[in-house]
């Protein structure tokens, strides 16, 4: 990763695919550029996998499944996963540097969230699989001798893992951890925007002795490239995907002919609901994180904020002050609160919504454009933290996922209205609810149509709990034992006594 310094990036060897335990360049010689979103400098070239590399990766994964990986006892497998977690922690700074270079996110954020969770995802699922009970039923039979039925869990096989760029290592290992713990092998397609940490994980796998072919990485894009080649590959037994809802729809079509199972964590347009009886300062702080953390590029983030009318003006003023307190800057600068967006394309998309809000008649409380950055930073993908009020609920800005550091704030008068507004969306990923009324907290939380509803907090995650989205925000639940539903199949065995 040291070769990613600006002066040597062009001449540095490209980031390679990782297939069967070897780092390999695509036979076609095709590469694509990986640029920093902070200042557009070239970080390096990435080898783009074609059909030959995707075939080879799937073949390597299949061979490992039938061979050394499949032959391991569960305890041997889980010991290797603990070793992977420890090795990520040992190379913590290397992962941190790679993740920050690719994403531009503040070092402080990646240090506390991305890399520790990347390691934890291997530990937690190793623990989970060791503690899973099995179903057992005694059954009556006409001859009175009976039968016993029990179910064993078997791995699904070769799992395709398609990952996004917003929390690259964290979200990729959230899938790879349980997949491997359950005895599967994987072919990972990281986002084209963030190829580094998935590749580095290949080094970790080799270093701790995970058999070759268990973990494979192919680089490239989605349609017409490595992503589509992988999801259409006949050797794939299941696809687990995190990303946009419309990409999920494309992947569903790709696997439909072969009727392969999918697990999807998709987009959202999450609501925050703030009652007048909330702990005001805590609600402002929490909503400030929910809207602006990671420059708004968090699937669980809030883009629609509903505030009970008596505190509406005061809340908007406090959230404005919070938005204006963030310093935009280089990730390694300790005072940086917000980094850039991931890419010029994403910046242009977010700015198009900023423009649209203005056209649709929004009141711009703060932000609303691109900031003036100095020197090299002027080439980066920066946008201002932005708050709007005054838009109708059917405006595109209120209905569509923007995935930027922005929100629309609207007042409500009754609990029923708050629930109706929160639920008025095609998405159903997460909500954050702020109230000191315990009965109301339980009552409202149960009515909101989402996979996770936080009360008086945001982004608190116990990895044993179910995680996923309702409506168009996903299919299935992962986390703790729930991940086993996707990464294993139950095989029922009936023994006549
Ligand atoms: P994306 O859908 O554009 O890309 C995700 C991955 O899919 C990338 O690796 C991409 O190359 C690949 N891909 C794209 N088209 C493909 C195709 N046709 N076939 C196979 N692979 C394809 O998403 P993104 O922009 O990387 O991430 C942002 C999105 O992810 C947002 O919508 C966000 O809400 C969502 N997200 C959801 C969760 C969740 O847990 N629900 C978590 C993080 C991000």
Image (tube, helix red, strand yellow):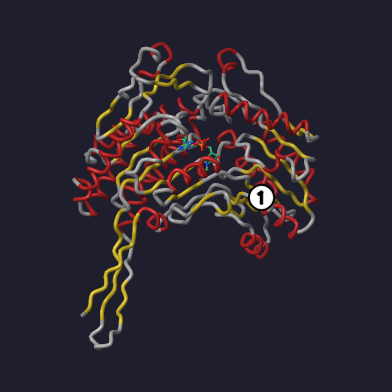
How many numbered markers are drawn? 1
Secondary structure category for the residue under label 1: loop
- Rendered location of residue 338, percent (x, y): 58, 30
Q: Going 63% across and 34% down the picture, which residue do you hit?
A: 405
Whether the residue under disc 1 has CB within 8 Å of ligand 1: no
In this rendered view, identify the residue nearer to me: 72 or 415.
72
- Could one spot residue 336 in this view of the protein? no
- On screen, residue 373 versus residue 388, left or right, reads left
Q: Quadrant of the N terminus?
A: top left
- On screen, residue 439 versus residue 334, left or right, reads right
Q: Is residue 10 placed above or below 248 in the rendered structure? A: above
- On screen, residue 74 versus residue 232, left or right, reads left
- Rendered location of residue 440, percent (x, y): 68, 63
Q: Quadrant of the C terminus?
A: bottom left
Instruction: In the displayed orientation, state which residue is furthest to the front.
Output: 257
- On screen, residue 392 versus residue 440, left or right, reads right
In this rendered view, identify the residue nearer to me: 479 or 230.
230
Q: Going 61% across and 24% down the picture, which residue do you hit?
A: 382
In this rendered view, identify the residue nearer to me: 75 or 299.
299
Which residue bears the numbered disc 1?
A: 425
Q: Going 30% across and 60% down the picture, which residue do you hit?
A: 153
- Rendered location of residue 490, percent (x, y): 33, 62
Q: Mark 1: few, some, or many residues within 10 Å (few <14, many ≥20)?
A: many
Q: Is residue 442 placed above or below 221 in the rendered structure? A: below
Q: Is residue 419 placed above or below 497 in the rendered structure? A: above
- Could one spot residue 300 in this view of the protein? yes
- Rendered location of residue 159, percent (x, y): 35, 45
């Amino acid at each position: 990763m040291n070769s990613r310094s600006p002066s040597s990036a062009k001449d540095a060897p490209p980031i390679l695919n990782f297939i069967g335990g070897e780092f390999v360049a695509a036979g076609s010689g095709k590469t694509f550029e990986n640029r920093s979103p902070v200042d557009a400098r070239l970080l390096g070239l990435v080898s783009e996998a074609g059909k030959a590399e995707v075939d080879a990766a799937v073949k390597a994964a299949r061979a490992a499944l039938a061979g050394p990986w499949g032959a391991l006892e569960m305890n041997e497998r889980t010991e290797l996963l603990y070793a992977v977690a420890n090795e990520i922690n040992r190379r913590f700074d290397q992962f941190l540097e790679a993740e920050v270079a690719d994403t531009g996110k503040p070092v402080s954020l990646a240090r506390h969230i991305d890399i520790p969770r990347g390691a934890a995802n291997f530990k937690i699922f190793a623990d989970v699989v060791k503690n899973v009970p099995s179903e057992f039923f005694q059954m009556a039979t006409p001859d009175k001798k009976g039968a016993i039925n029990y179910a064993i869990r078997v791995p699904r096989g070769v799992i395709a893992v398609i990952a996004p760029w917003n929390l690259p290592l964290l979200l990729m290992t959230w899938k790879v951890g349980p997949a491997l713990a359950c005895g599967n092998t994987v072919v990972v397609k990281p986002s084209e925007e963030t190829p580094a940490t998935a590749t580095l994980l290949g080094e970790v796998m080799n270093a701790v002795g995970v058999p070759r072919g268990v973990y494979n990485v192919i680089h490239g894009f989605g349609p017409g490239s490595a992503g589509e080649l992988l999801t259409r590959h006949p050797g794939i037994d299941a696809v687990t995907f995190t990303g946009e809802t419309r990409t999920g729809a494309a992947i569903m079509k790709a696997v439909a002919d072969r009727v392969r199972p999918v697990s999807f964590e998709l987009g959202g347009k999450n609501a925050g609901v703030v009652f007048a009886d909330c702990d005001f300062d805590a609600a402002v702080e929490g909503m400030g994180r929910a809207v602006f953390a990671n420059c708004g590029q968090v699937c669980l983030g809030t883009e629609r904020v509903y505030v009970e009318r008596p505190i509406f003006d005061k809340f908007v003023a406090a959230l404005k002050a919070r938005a204006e307190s963030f310093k935009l800057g280089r990730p390694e600068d300790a005072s940086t609160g917000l980094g850039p967006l991931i890419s010029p394309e994403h910046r242009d998309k977010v700015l198009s919504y900023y423009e649209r809000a203005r056209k649709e008649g929004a009141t711009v409380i703060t932000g609303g454009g691109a900031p003036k950055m100095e020197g090299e930073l002027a080439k980066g993908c920066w946008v201002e933290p932005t708050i709007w009020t005054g838009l109708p609920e059917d405006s595109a800005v209120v209905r569509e996922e923007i995935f930027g550091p922005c929100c629309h704030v609207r007042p409500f008068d009754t609990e029923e209205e708050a629930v109706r507004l929160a639920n008025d969306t095609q998405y159903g990923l997460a909500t954050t609810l702020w109230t000191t009324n315990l009965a109301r907290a339980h009552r409202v939380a149960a009515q909101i149509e989402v996979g996770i509803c936080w009360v008086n907090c945001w982004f608190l995650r116990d990895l044993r709990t179910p995680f996923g989205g309702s409506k168009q925000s996903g299919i299935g639940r992962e986390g703790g034992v729930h991940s086993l539903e996707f990464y294993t199949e139950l095989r029922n065995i009936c023994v006549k006594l």
